[in-house]
Amino acid sequence: MNDWASILPLVILVVAFLVLVIRPARANRRQFQQLQSTLTPGQHVMLASGIFGEIVTIGDETIELRIAPEVVVTVNRHAVSRVIGSEPTSEPGTDV
């Protein structure tokens, strides 16, 4: 009985670590992989740095992103952090 009492805190720590750290990290990784597999040209995306643009072409490791008319940059594919549902109706700082 005394052996179980000394091991119980360690078991609780391991279970807490699994529930609070490992499972959410695994879910985030799965969500990121799903995002990467669904990228297509023409989608509006946001990079991890906060730059918005439209995907022009997709390679194995890179994408070409149009960030302004006639301005296309090549970035690492993993820099895409989210897909934007619809294009904003006006540019920030402009009056409509």
Image (cartoon, helix red, strand yellow):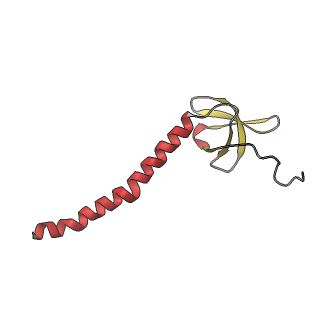
Q: Residue at x 47, y 45 (%)?
A: 29
Q: Is residue 11 left or right of residue 75?
A: left
Q: Is residue 25 left or right of residue 67?
A: left
Residue 57 coordinates in the image, percent (x, y): 67, 29
Q: Give the total of numbered labels.
A: 0
Toward which corner of the image does residue 67 lie, by quadrant?
A: top right
The quadrant of the image that shows the N terminus is bottom left
* Viewer-proximal residue among 75 and 24: 24
Q: Is residue 57 above or below residue 78?
A: above
Q: Residue at x 57, y 33 (%)?
A: 61
Residue 94 coordinates in the image, percent (x, y): 87, 52
Q: Residue at x 18, y 65 (%)?
A: 7
Q: Residue at x 57, y 34 (%)?
A: 38
Residue 10 coordinates in the image, percent (x, y): 24, 64
Q: Is residue 41 above or below residue 8?
A: above
Toward which corner of the image does residue 63 lie, by quadrant?
A: top right
Please identify the residue farthest to the right as the structure is shown. 95
Toward which corner of the image does residue 69 lie, by quadrant?
A: top right
Residue 59 coordinates in the image, percent (x, y): 61, 28
